[in-house]
């Protein structure tokens, strides 16, 4: 079966920088940062009291036909979906046969905290438990819009969002849907930040992707969602087309709970496999939006992976991480980073790696340090790598 082309026709975000794509992009390329002290709960005891928090935040349940507000992570997702659907110019009738692939690391995390508190106080609230379930956001999404196509939810750590895009792409490629929503969502909560503090993936200082003085990552919250569409279907309805998804891949290192495998072999394989799927040569890539967590071992491993696939060409392109600006958005990270990559293709501007303070001989590529840069981009890759060894990569191209 000949595979169909897949277009990106709608974008939506909620991030620590902004809760819409236009403002998010403008603040991102200005080098602004959304890292700040956590205010939504007491961060005492955590390795770092700062994160990428979405604040101020307001949600109007009635706008989504809801009697009460769902968990905050779900709120982020629904707002991002509303933006992307509007951006794509889709009607409820056109969405009737659409599907969705979502990604999350912690589901309705704050609802879990509230359920535990209510249980320990001997007044358990079942509604909090229901909102914690990982699939609840998908249920709400399908109820807010009449999605009756294929639906699924991934939770493969930090690679989830990028993999969600890839799985949605395949459902369109091979004729199971004409329109798919691919999104990721997560919210900050004490329990998972406590766990990440114990694992020491969180820095006690500040996040500095690819810098010599890096000491770990900082996490954030939010959501990203893209509308993917059969290319011919999008053209026939006169939809705006941002770019095309031409390839993707996912794999597992099966190596260590938190550390990348030696030399970034898993990331090397996922990048090469995605390029093979896209049927383009590595020398055609003009920009890479890297995972770039700012952890001691990940950044040089990702650098090695890129160099092993692209060779000398790796030194000719920009490679940037936006985590210094917004933090690591967990299940939302891959989708928000893909949206930043779509905007880079559209605008011809490379987003910067902010808070970079000193070069590291092991990280010797062009990381678009601290300042955005104009650049002509025809092909771009975005890479995600997760705790436990999950990796995913998506290849995008100009139309």
Image (spheres, rainbow, N blue to C red):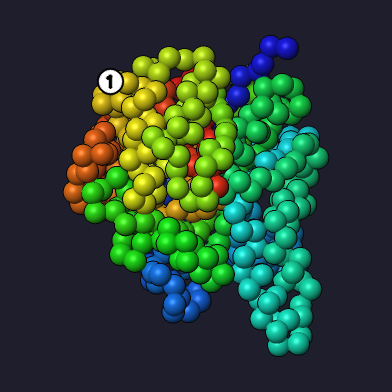
Residue at 25%, 48% (x, y): give it.
211
Which quadrant of the view contains residue 215?
A: bottom left
- Please identify the residue farthest to the top as the structure is shown: 2
Q: Is residue 195 above or below residue 297?
A: below
Which quadrant of the view contains residue 252?
A: top right
Which quadrant of the view contains residue 132?
A: bottom right
Residue at 57%, 33% (x, y): give it.
250
Q: Is residue 334 above or below residue 280?
A: below
The x and y percentages for residue 153 are: 69, 46
The x and y percentages for residue 339 are: 48, 40
- Please identify the residue farthest to the left as the structure is shown: 358
> In the drawing, does residue 363 fall left or right of residue 259?
left
Give the quadrant of the N terminus: top right
> In the drawing, does residue 259 fall left or right of residue 252?
left
- Please identify the residue farthest to the bottom as the structure is shown: 121
Residue at 67%, 41% (x, y): give it.
101
Out of 65 and 155, give the one closest to the viewer: 155
Out of 244 and 43, give the one closest to the viewer: 43
Q: Is residue 376 visible?
A: no
Number of disc labels? 1
The x and y percentages for residue 64 are: 70, 57
Residue at 20%, 51% (x, y): give it.
357
The x and y percentages for residue 5 are: 61, 19
Q: Is residue 91 above or below residue 268?
A: below
Out of 337 and 295, give the one closest to the viewer: 295
Identify the secondary structure beneath mark 1. helix
Q: Is residue 264 visible?
A: yes
Q: Residues within 10 Å of mark 1 (few under 14, many from 20)?
A: few
- The residue tagged 1 is 312
């Amino acid at each position: 079966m000949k595979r169909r082309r897949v277009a990106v026709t709608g974008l939506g975000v909620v991030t620590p920088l902004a809760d819409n794509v236009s403002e998010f992009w403008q603040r991102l390329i200005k080098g602004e940062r959304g890292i700040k002290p956590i205010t939504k709960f007491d961060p005492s005891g955590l390795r770092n009291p700062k994160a990428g928090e979405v604040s101020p935040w307001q949600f109007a349940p009635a706008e989504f036909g809801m009697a009460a507000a769902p968990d905050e992570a779900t709120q982020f997702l629904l707002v991002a979906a509303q933006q992307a659907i509007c951006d794509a110019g889709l009607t409820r009738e056109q969405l009737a046969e659409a599907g969705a692939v979502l990604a999350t690391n912690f589901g309705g995390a704050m609802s879990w905290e509230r359920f535990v508190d209510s249980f320990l106080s001997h007044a358990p609230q079942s509604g909090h438990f229901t909102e914690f379930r990982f699939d609840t956001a998908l249920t709400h999404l399908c109820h807010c819009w009449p999605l009756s196509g294929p639906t699924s939810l991934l939770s493969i750590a930090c690679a989830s969002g990028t993999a969600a895009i890839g799985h949605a792409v395949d459902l369109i490629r091979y004729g199971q849907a004409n329109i798919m929503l691919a999104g990721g969502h997560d919210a900050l909560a004490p329990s998972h930040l406590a766990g990440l503090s114990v694992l020491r993936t969180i820095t006690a200082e500040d996040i500095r992707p690819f810098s010599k003085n890096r000491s770990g990552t900082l996490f954030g919250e939010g959501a990203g969602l893209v509308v993917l569409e059969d290319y011919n279907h999008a053209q026939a309805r006169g939809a705006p087309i941002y770019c095309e998804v031409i390839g993707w891949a996912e794999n597992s290192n099966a190596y260590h709970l938190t550390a990348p495998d030696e030399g970034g072999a898993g990331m090397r394989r996922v990048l090469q496999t995605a390029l093979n799927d896209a049927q383009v040569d590595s020398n055609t890539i003009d920009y890479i939006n890297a995972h770039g967590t700012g952890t001691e071992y990940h950044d040089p491993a990702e650098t090695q992976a890129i160099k092993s696939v692209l060779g000398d060409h790796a030194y000719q392109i920009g490679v940037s991480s936006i985590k210094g600006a917004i933090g690591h958005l967990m299940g939302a990270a891959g989708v928000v980073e893909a949206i930043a990559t779509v905007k880079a293709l559209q605008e011809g501007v490379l987003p910067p790696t902010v808070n970079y303070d000193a070069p590291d001989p092991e990280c010797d590529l062009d990381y678009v340090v601290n300042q955005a840069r104009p650049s002509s981009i025809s092909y771009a890759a975005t890479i995600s790598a997760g705790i436990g060894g999950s990796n995913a990569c998506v290849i995008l191209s100009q139309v």
